[in-house]
Every structure is written in C-alpha cells, then in structure tokens.
C-alpha cells in the first residue's frame, strides 16, 4: 500500500519518472519498471514542470520524500506485467 500511495502522490504532484523508450526485448517490463522504482526512491531522473532533473530534486521540489523501498517493495514494482497492461489500457482508451 505504501508503494502505491507513493506512486500516486508522485504522479498527482506532477513527478514523472524518466523511463527509456528503448531497451532489451528480453527484459520485458523489468527494465522500464526498474527505472520507475529508481525514481520513486530518489535515484535516476524524473520530469517535473517540464524539466528533466535528478529524481531526488524533482521529489523535493514537489514536496515529497523518496520512498524507502524495501526488498519486497522493489520486487512488487518490477515483477509484473503492469507496464504492458497499462500500455494496453491506454491504447484501448485511444481506440
């Protein structure tokens, strides 16, 4: 629950993790979701108010603390087909 609420808080505040659009085909959702988890923890990059910056800075500017991700939190974020499911939902909405 803490991870979901942290992700929602970041997105609602306008902090968007920078996730590369190209990666390894064999990595499936793991690499993109790893970048998402990294940004929530204050590492990597995020977009905030139209600027790409270090994720820690974006979170701070938005008045948020980096999530204290634990072992099971990271596992829950990256081991799922949530990226593919979310992308499919967005495509369905566009149709």
Image: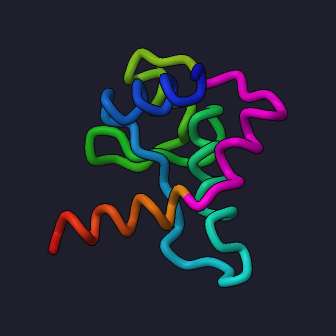
Left or right, residue 29 beside residue 87: right
Residue that extends furthest to the bottom in the rendered view of this protein: 25
Q: Residue at x 28, y 63 (%)?
A: 90
Left or right, residue 62 beside residue 33: left
Segment colored magenta = 67-81
Q: Residue at x 65, y 73 (%)?
A: 28
Residue 64: x, y in percent?
47, 18
Viewer-nearest residue: 49 or 83: 83
- Does residue 8 lie above or below 63 as drawn? below
- Does residue 60 lie above or below 42 as drawn? above
Left or right, residue 85 beside residue 48: right
Residue 60: x, y in percent?
48, 21
Residue that extends furthest to the right in the rendered view of this protein: 71
Residue 45: x, y in percent?
54, 48
Magenta includes 16?
Answer: no
Q: Residue at x 73, y 28 (%)?
A: 69
Q: Residue at x 19, y 64 (%)?
A: 93
């Amino acid at each position: 629950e803490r991870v979901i609420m942290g992700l929602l808080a970041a997105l609602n505040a306008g902090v968007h993790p920078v996730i590369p659009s190209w990666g390894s085909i064999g990595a499936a959702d793991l690499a993109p979701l790893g970048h998402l988890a990294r940004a929530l923890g204050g590492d990597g990059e995020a977009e905030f108010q139209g600027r790409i910056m270090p994720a820690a800075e974006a979170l701070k500017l938005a008045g948020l603390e980096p999530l204290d991700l634990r072992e099971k939190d990271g596992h829950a974020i990256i081991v799922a087909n949530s990226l593919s499911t979310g992308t499919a939902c967005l495509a369905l909405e566009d149709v």
